[in-house]
Image: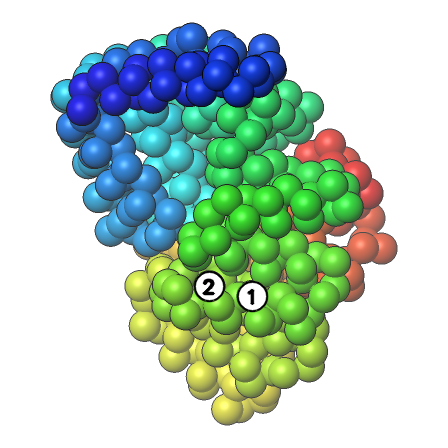
Amino acid sequence: MAGILALESEVAKKVAGALALKLLPAEQARLANVRTVNPEAYDAYLRGLQHCYRLLPGDLDSAQKYFELALTRDPNYALAYAGIAMVWASRQQMGYAPPREAGPKAKAAAEKAIALGVGIAESHFALAMIKAWTDWDWAGAEVEFRRAIEINPGFPDARAYYAFLLKILQRSREALPQVERALQLDPVNPLFQSYYAHHLFCVRRYDDAIAQARQAVQTQPNLPNAYYALWGGYRAKGMNKEAVAAAKASLASYGDPGVAEAFDRGYAQGGYPAAMKLAAEELTRLSNKSFVLPKDIADLYVEAGEKTKALEWFEKGFELRDSNMPNLRLPFFYDSLRSEPRFQDLLRRMNLPP
């Protein structure tokens, strides 16, 4: 097992030669630079990756333990450092750790992965993630995403997240083929299924987005990203009761029963806007004792029709470097704010298209 990747490399070169195939330079380099991998390290990495895709607090903790286990077996294992970078980037994205804590740790792990693994797709992918959602360096992120895809065109993660970068940069026509290709490469991955739903929502294919998000929920019933896509799809279709249920599920990862109760109480008192307002107020109270993503609170105030409060929380998101702030380019949810000077100023400060 210890030499399996090197053996595969040799077999691939012989097959190419036998079939008179002309390998691209990137393919030649990838085959030439394959290093012997400790099988226990590789197994731990794969197990960590499986947990990382689930995006729940306990799963991210398990993922980090597996990636650290891989490093005990192989201290110079670039993939393990790339995995640790993804864990901290995910904690930052989901609000399980504040950006001031998660961002530097994600960046340090990504830089270590690059130092150990230049020419490894996962290393460039990890660095691309940090440049995009921690540094907001859109040009630098695109360079790293494209490099990861060039090194390994069959690496679905790079395509899935590159699609998100393209969406943020208002290049939806380029984005959709990338996420579709990611899903072709890994069709049963619930995270990629939910990302595809997001992209369908962004091009206003609401029925398709709902169907795709439901499929993701069937695959992983507690995936927050899938419920966020459902929330948007239902809201766009005027299905307010279903939208409230999806919004409640998308924020369930905070683990606070008061937020769920606020959704229910608000909807009973005054329908959709009241449900959003009471949930925003409850999430604000929660933020006084634990970290809450400012954008999550802002989103609820947007849906409650409270523009001023929404913009105040978006400002906090900008100040704290909430990694979800670039998603202000998402259509429909923020249509009511497009003409607001403060909203346009936020986009400019993040160097995003207006």
* Residue 7 visible within the image: yes
Q: Is residue 311 visible?
A: no
Residue at the (53%, 20%) spot, across then down = 19
In the image, residue 58 above or below residue 304: above
Q: Return the residue nearer the eye: 171 or 149.
A: 149
Q: Position of residue 237 (x, y in %)?
A: 69, 78
Which quarter of the rendering shows the N terminus? Answer: top left
- Residue type, label 1: Gln
In the image, taking residue 324 as reference, residue 191 lies left or right, namely left
From the viewer's side, name the closer residue of 142 and 10.
10
Residue drawn at (72%, 66%), measured in percent from left and top? Answer: 205
Badge number at residue 216: 2
Distance between mark 2 and mark 1 Cα atoms = 6 Å
Whether pointer 2 and pointer 1 mark residues with C-beta atoms closer than 8 Å, the reply is yes
Color style of the picture: rainbow
| Amino acid type, mark 2 | Ala
Q: Residue furthest bottom?
A: 268
